């Protein structure tokens, strides 16, 4: 079974995201919305596959993911943002080929949440992990990578973090949890998981046979981005992983 964790905070598109998951999945699925310190204005759909968990106070995205994974009962776990749509049979397509030490991402399209339509824009396939300047400092960031490959299932370096699937055993043995004391509550979760996976000998893989679409950045966000909390998280990731990235990852990937 696939357990889908949705960290949720005041997003009006949560219900539509759940509908898309249920309508496009083909296997056994449970959906775990983690209602992070708010009361949804509309009741969740009445379906035994939807198993919400509630935080009485806003703990942030990282702890919401941790809570959802802890509550999950499936052999595989998936995380998605609360403003996404999914390709038909996305779950079976990914689970048919996933390996025990993989984190898998689908191709990422862009969603117009008002029209609830996939936008006419080129999807993101490969992403390169770079250290970039962002105005207030430096940070790890995934950037679009114009890599060409004939493989439908292929290794990649980075992900947005808005949708991924991995075996639950990999989470329990390698990821363990997303750290909130060091990184804070919101940022750099994808990079923490990628580095832990590489250190343990695993891979991050893109499956181009399926897709999801994530809300385009032109539309409002439900969490605030930037400021001191972001700076703290960006610095923490560099403090922990920059030497490993520079000395081992850069030479391996020849970037």
Image (tube, helix red, strand yellow):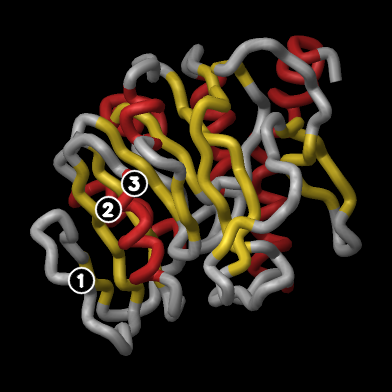
Q: Is residue 219 left or right of residue 136?
A: left
Residue 204 locus on image (x, y percent): 55, 24
Element marked by disc 3: helix
Pointer 1 with pointer 2, Cβ within 8 A:
yes
Please tell me which of labels 1 and 3 falls first in the chain. Answer: 3
Q: Is residue 214 left or right of residue 174?
A: right
Using a 10 Å C-alpha cutoff, classify the residue at mark 1 as few (fewer than 14 neighbours), some (14 to 19) or many (20 or more): few
Pointer 2 with pointer 3, Cβ within 8 A:
yes
Residue 49 locus on image (x, y percent): 14, 54
Cα–Cα span, label 1 and label 2:
11 Å
Location of mark 3 (residue): 24
Mark carried by residue 45: 1
The residue at the far bottom in this view is: 41
Q: Residue at left 16%, top 60%?
A: 51
Q: Quadrant of the N terminus?
A: top left
Location of mark 2 (residue): 22
Q: Nearer the viewer, mark 1 or mark 3?
A: 3
């Amino acid at each position: 079974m696939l357990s889908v964790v949705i960290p949720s905070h005041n997003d009006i598109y949560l219900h539509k995201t759940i509908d898309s998951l249920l309508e496009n999945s083909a296997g056994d699925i449970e959906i775990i919305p983690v209602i992070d310190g708010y009361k949804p204005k509309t009741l969740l759909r009445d379906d035994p596959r939807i198993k919400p968990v509630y935080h009485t106070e806003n703990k942030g995205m990282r702890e919401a993911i941790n809570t959802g994974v802890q509550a999950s009962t499936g052999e595989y776990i998936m995380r998605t943002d609360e403003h996404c749509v999914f390709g038909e049979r996305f779950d079976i397509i990914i689970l048919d080929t996933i390996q025990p030490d993989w984190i898998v991402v689908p191709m990422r399209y862009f969603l117009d949440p008002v029209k609830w339509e996939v936008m006419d824009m080129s999807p993101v396939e490969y992403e390169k992990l770079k250290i970039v300047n962002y105005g207030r400092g430096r940070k790890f960031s995934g950037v679009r990578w114009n890599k060409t490959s004939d493989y439908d299932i292929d290794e990649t370096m980075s992900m947005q973090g808005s949708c991924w699937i991995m075996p639950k055993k990999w989470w329990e043995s390698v990821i363990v949890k997303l750290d909130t004391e060091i990184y804070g509550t919101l940022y750099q979760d994808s990079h923490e998981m990628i580095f832990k996976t590489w250190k343990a000998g695993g891979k991050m893989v893109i499956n181009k046979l399926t897709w999801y679409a994530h809300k385009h950045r032109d539309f409002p966000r439900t969490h605030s981005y930037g400021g001191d909390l972001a700076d703290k998280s960006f610095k923490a990731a560099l403090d922990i992983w920059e030497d490993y990235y520079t000395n081992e990852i850069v030479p391996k990937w020849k970037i």
